């Protein structure tokens, strides 16, 4: 059974969704037959390499919220993340373009390290305040999960697998996926958002029954 997941490295709900799926898979009888495939989705394709504006101001401007509203929302997300064992530092996030991070996930998937690369990038972004558009940062993170740093450095200097990222995003658009994470199970069942593990487990069991 394949599970395709559209998500962005800069999406706090996507990291929570990843943990939720892992909890569901731990309870799923057919987990050994499941293959997770990460698909690219950029929340802001036009983002610059790095924004100088603090995240609170970015969100307040984007969603027309007050600073107090932003703080309250961020606090709720941080608390939910903590319930899954994730340590978010949303006020320290370094916002920027995630296109190359998505290319790197595709590269890692070619050698069976896609999930490890996705995990490392999410942790770096939300817990370590890493700038995931920076190539040397990406090289270091990739090396930690087992990719050759020299090969990754060469890869990032090219546009290799850019088409794979754009293909994923085109698929999302053609299927009407407007929010992430979006889980597509067995090519037949789709659900969006950071769903509770019980919801995902039910979806997995439904797909397994055919």
Image (cartoon, rainbow, N blue to C red):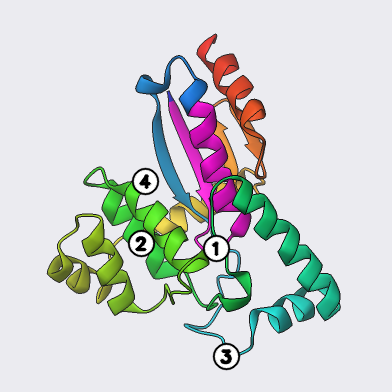
Contact, mark 4 vs mark 3 (Cβ under 8 Å) = no
Residue identifier under label 3: 52
SS class, disc 4: helix
Q: Which mark is first along the chain, 3 or 2?
A: 3
Q: Which quadrant of the rendered structure holds the N terminus?
A: top left
Relative vertical location of residue 108 with respect to residue 175 in this rendering, above or below: below
Camera sees residue 65: no
Residue identifier under label 4: 115
Q: Residue at x 26, y 70 (%)?
A: 140
Cα distance, mark 2 to mark 4?
Answer: 14 Å
Residue identifier under label 2: 103
Camera sees residue 145: yes
Q: Residue at x 25, y 70 (%)?
A: 139
Residue 97 highlighted magenta (yes or no): no
Cα distance, mark 2 to mark 3?
Answer: 24 Å
Residue identifier under label 1: 42
Q: Exactly how many numbered labels are in the figure?
A: 4
Q: Residues within 10 Å of mark 3 (few under 14, many from 20)?
A: few
């Amino acid at each position: 059974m394949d599970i395709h997941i559209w998500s962005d490295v800069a999406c706090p709900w996507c990291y929570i969704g990843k943990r939720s799926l892992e909890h569901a898979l731990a309870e799923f009888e057919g987990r050994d037959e499941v293959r997770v495939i990460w698909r690219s989705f950029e929340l802001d394709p036009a983002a610059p390499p790095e924004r100088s504006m603090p995240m609170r101001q970015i969100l307040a401007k984007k969603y027309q919220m007050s600073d107090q509203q932003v703080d309250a929302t961020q606090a709720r997300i941080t608390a939910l993340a903590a319930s899954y064992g994730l340590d978010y530092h949303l006020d320290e996030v370094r916002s920027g373009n995630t296109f190359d991070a998505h290319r790197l996930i595709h590269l890692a998937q070619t050698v069976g390290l896609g999930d490890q690369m996705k995990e490392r990038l999410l942790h770096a972004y939300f817990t370590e305040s890493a700038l995931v558009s920076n190539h040397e940062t990406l090289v270091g993170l990739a090396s930690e999960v087992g990719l050759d740093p020299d090969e990754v450095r060469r890869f990032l200097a090219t546009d290799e697998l850019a088409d794979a990222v754009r293909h994923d995003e085109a698929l999302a658009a053609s299927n009407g996926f407007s929010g992430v994470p979006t889980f597509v199970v067995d090519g037949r069942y789709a659900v969006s958002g950071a769903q509770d593990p019980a919801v995902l487990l039910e979806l997995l069991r439904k797909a397994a029954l055919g």
